[in-house]
Image (cartoon, helix red, strand yellow):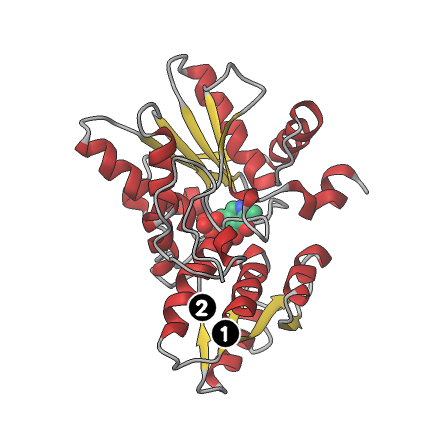
Amino acid sequence: MSTDAAPRTNSAPASPFPTDDPVLRLIGDTPLVSYPGTDRGRVLCKLETENPTRSMKDRIAMGILSEALAEGEYDTVVEASSGNTAGAVAFVANRLGADCKLACPDSTSRQKIGYMKAFGAEVHECPSDVESGHPDHYRSVAQRLADEDDGAFLVDQYHNQSNPGVHYQWTGPEIWGQAGDRMTHLVGAMGTGGILSGSARYVQEQAAAAGRDVTVIGVDAKQSNISTAFYGKEPVPYDTEVEGLGKGGDLPTMWFDYIDEMRDVADERAFTQARTSAQEHGLLIGPSAGAALSVALDISEEQPDATVVTIICDGGEQYFDTLFDV
Ligand SMILES: Cc1ncc(COP(=O)(O)O)c(C=O)c1O
């Protein structure tokens, strides 16, 4: 097997989770490109779509599973997820030779279930109309699958500190290596808070050491509860079609200390931005990335000297039906 350690881009620091596996080596080292809709270099998109399952969740699956499975204590991986994490966990478990059991709500898109099944995971589709805490809720089902099997490891992205920790070790250093000399803002959508707060911690530490400031802005939907939690306000009824944004509640993986501000985006704007990005600029992005990009564009308009890095969490191909009515 190849042990070639060359990164895909020239600027990437070495992966903190080295592997000889040629497929797992495709995770990370993602490009940072200038958004074509602005003057070159003003808004920079970190294309996490370039990971093998088309989202940044490949990184946490790789970081968490490679460490958990290293000791040989576990042979099965379990996770509850309605989104990108499930596909990423299925993919990495496949390459690391572990069995994979996933619980998701039955409202999960067929594209996302496709990723889980493609990599051979056992998929438990659970009723989506039951409250959290109900025995049939997908998180309860995942917990039961893990409890029933001594060899099972539960990833638990909503509580596992390695979720932001992996981004602190991996995504943050990549972003700093690519734009640390000029970035003034970092903008990203928040669900578990992993990618933005983990990357933000690294970027803020480096900026402080260099005597500079980087402002970190979290993005939420108007009818979602990350910004209400951040500002200590009453929660609003959760009602957003933008997948990946958090519901609030218990948020231990959200390292709010490294977030300066939250901005809310209406669903329609997030979807329109994702469509515009593809139709006018050839960049196929998902709605949560559309929300983040719309805030990045606002900042670049408000502050003509800003250089804004925004995280593109996933690609538009998982949302062809809702974005482009196919
Ligand atoms: C499409 C999409 N965008 C944004 C997020 C938020 O990322 P994080 O959970 O790291 O905050 C997620 C997480 O599930 C996601 O799937």
Q: Are marks 1 and 2 in contact (CB under 8 Å)?
A: yes
The answer to which of 221 and 186 lies nearer the viewer is 186
**Which residue is drawn at the image coordinates 38% and 71% (left, top)?**
68
Q: Is residue 94 above or below residue 282?
A: below
What is the number of the mark on residue 77? 1
Labels 1 and 2: the sequence-earlier one: 1
**Which residue is drawn at the image coordinates 29% and 42% (left, top)?**
202
**Which residue is drawn at the image coordinates 38% and 35% (left, top)?**
11
* Mark 1 CB near ligand 1 (8 Å cut): no
Where is residue 7? Give x, y as percent.
Answer: 43, 44
The answer to which of 212 and 22 lies nearer the viewer is 22
What is the number of the mark on residue 155? 2
**Which residue is drawn at the image coordinates 27% and 44% (left, top)?**
257
Nearer the camera: disc 1 or disc 2: 1
Label 2 Cα crowd, 10 Å radius (few <14 / some 14-19 / many 20+) = many
Quadrant location of the C terminus in the rendered image: top right
Which quadrant holds residue 9? top left
Where is residue 165? Give x, y as percent.
Answer: 33, 54
Label 1, label 2: how far apart the Cα atoms are? 7 Å
Where is residue 21? Give x, y as percent.
Answer: 49, 61
- Is disc 2 placed on a helix, strand or loop? loop
